[in-house]
């Protein structure tokens, strides 16, 4: 009698797949593509693309100071591996510090701080449920040894993060320090101009004109 050879079982292995990961989505490494920005001084990382309309203020302020930057979307919870890649890329591209923005539990700035010795500035984003208090406390209450410099919630924080970044970089850049001084001078002039208009028009007309401009 002929010996029957056991039939080979065709075991189908599930391929790793993420929607939008491209033709090589079977390999998770292909999804976490390395950012390609070069020659930066500041790296911005946001936890969600919904943060971008606010973080646009950060980018605008950096541009006003002629500071080159990169920007990436990476979630500490949903793409932890990609966060690490963004941090490593920022270091290799010459970033001197990282600005991280996140809302809700807001782990991103702290996770980034644990991955690098570069200074990290955290921007807590305002949310619908707790008005951003959850994000603020998550970012500001870091354990001793892994600090995150936390700025104000939302839009004021987005602007201030860029200014703090500029001030840090200005420690070794006199030209940038002069730009910051000029910015402060213009800011003061704007307030004085408003005060003069208030004295001239009175409070009611001043408020009425201000509301028309909104």
Image (spheres, rainbow, N blue to C red):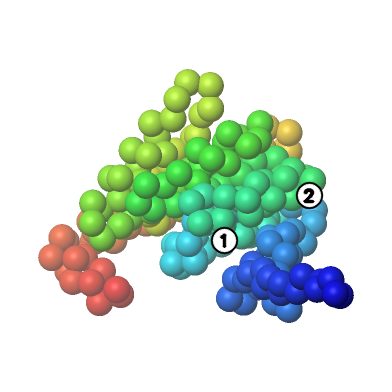
| Relative image position of residue 114 (x, y in whole percent) | 58, 34
Q: What residue is at 75 percent from the left and 74 percent from the top?
A: 7
| Relative image position of residue 1 (x, y in whole percent) | 85, 74
Comparing 70 with 13, the one in front is: 13
Q: Which mark is residue 73?
A: 1
Outermost residue to the right: 2
Q: Which residue matches tag 2?
A: 93
- Left or right position of 140 against 81: left
- Left or right position of 105 against 49: left
Comparing 143 with 121, the one in front is: 143
Comparing 27 with 113, the one in front is: 27
Alpha carbons under labels 1 and 2: distance apart: 17 Å
Outermost residue to the left: 204
Say which of marks 1 and 2 sits in front.
1
| Relative image position of residue 73 (x, y in whole percent) | 57, 61
Q: What residue is at 37 percent from the left and 47 percent from the top?
A: 105
Image: 174 above or below 68? above
Quarter location, residue 28: bottom right
Q: Note whether residue 92 is visible.
A: yes
Pointer 1 with pointer 2, Cβ within 8 A: no
């Amino acid at each position: 009698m002929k010996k029957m050879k056991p039939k080979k079982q065709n075991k189908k292995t599930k391929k790793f797949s993420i929607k939008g990961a491209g033709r090589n989505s079977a390999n998770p490494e292909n999804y976490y593509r390395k950012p390609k920005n070069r020659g930066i001084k500041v790296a911005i990382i946001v936890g969600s693309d919904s943060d971008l309309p606010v973080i646009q203020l950060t980018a605008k302020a950096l541009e006003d100071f002629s500071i080159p930057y990169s920007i990436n979307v990476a979630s500490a919870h949903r793409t932890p591996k990609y966060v690490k890649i963004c941090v490593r890329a920022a270091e290799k591209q010459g970033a001197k510090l990282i600005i991280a923005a996140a809302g809700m539990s807001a782990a991103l700035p702290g996770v980034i701080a644990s991955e690098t010795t570069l200074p990290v500035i955290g921007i807590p984003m305002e949310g619908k449920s707790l008005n951003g208090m959850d994000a603020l406390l998550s970012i500001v209450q870091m354990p001793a040894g892994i600090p995150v410099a936390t700025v104000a919630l939302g839009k004021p924080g987005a602007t201030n993060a860029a200014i703090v970044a500029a001030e840090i970089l200005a420690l070794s850049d006199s030209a940038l320090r002069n730009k910051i001084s000029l910015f402060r001078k213009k800011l003061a002039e704007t307030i004085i101009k408003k005060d003069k208009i208030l004295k001239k028009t009175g409070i009611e007309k001043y408020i009425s004109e201000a509301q028309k401009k909104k």
